[in-house]
Amino acid sequence: DSSSQALLKQSIYAGGDWMGLSHKLSNNEVLLPVPLTENRVVDERFDVLLASETTYTTESCQDTAYLMLKHLKVDIGVGLVATKRFYFGVGGGADAFAQAADKVSESSQSHGLRLVVRTIQSYDTGNANIRDLLEVRLVKK
């Protein structure tokens, strides 16, 4: 329908290494899937950021938190992070991401902003690792 087409024209889909992607977004180096029009301005802050299976180590948690801090729109943007509760043996997971979000919010890179993380849904089949869907918001301190 026409509303889906309009949304698609306003969307940017990108993937890859979070820190590399953050650098490319900050420097307008992201290749866009649809041609830009004169009326379309690409901002380095976004309404929605989606991440799945990006919190598998403490380092990847830190990178994902940094990307959310640097590229979510303040007060209105939302990040959704789909993750396992624990990544055994490598230190990542939902709690590790929340800790990384706190750490990056306390850093000098936060510029008066902080990430707020909450679990909005948990998926427990009873026979596998619990998966969590985390909501991330960027707010002023």
Image (spheres, rainbow, N blue to C red):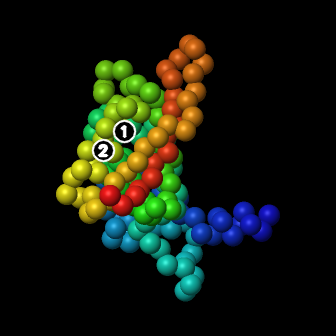
Q: Is residue 80 visible?
A: yes
Q: Image quadrant of residue 21?
A: bottom left
Q: Position of residue 86 (x, y in %)?
A: 40, 25
- Determine the residue located farthest toward the front in the rendered image: 141
For the point 57% across and 64% down, the residue is: 11
- For the residues bearing labels 1 and 2, Cβ distance under 8 angstroms: yes
Please name the amino acid that badge 2 sits on: Asp
Residue tagged by mark 1? 98
> Which residue is outermost to the right?
1
Left or right: residue 78 versus residue 68 is: right
Q: Residues within 10 Å of mark 1 (few under 14, many from 20)?
A: many
Q: Is residue 98 above or below residue 10?
A: above
Identify the residue shown where x is 52% and y is 57%: 48
The x and y percentages for residue 45 are 43, 66
Residue 123 higher or lower than 71, as above or below? above
Using the rendered image of the protein, determine whether residue 62 is visible from the camera's viewpoint: no
**Does dot 2 land on a helix, a strand or a loop?**
helix
Q: Residue at x 36, y 38 (%)?
A: 97
Please tell me in which quadrant of the rendered image residue 28 appears: bottom left
* Residue 50 spot, x, y in % from top left: 51, 50
Q: Residue furthest top?
A: 127
Q: Residue at position x 44%, y 72% from top?
A: 43
Residue 63 against residue 42 in the figure, above or below: above
Q: Which quadrant of the figure contains the C terminus?
A: bottom left
Mark 1: which secondary structure?
helix
At which x and y percent is residue 6? 69, 70
Location of the N terminus (image quadrant): bottom right
Instruction: Report which residue position mark 2 lands on.
Output: 102
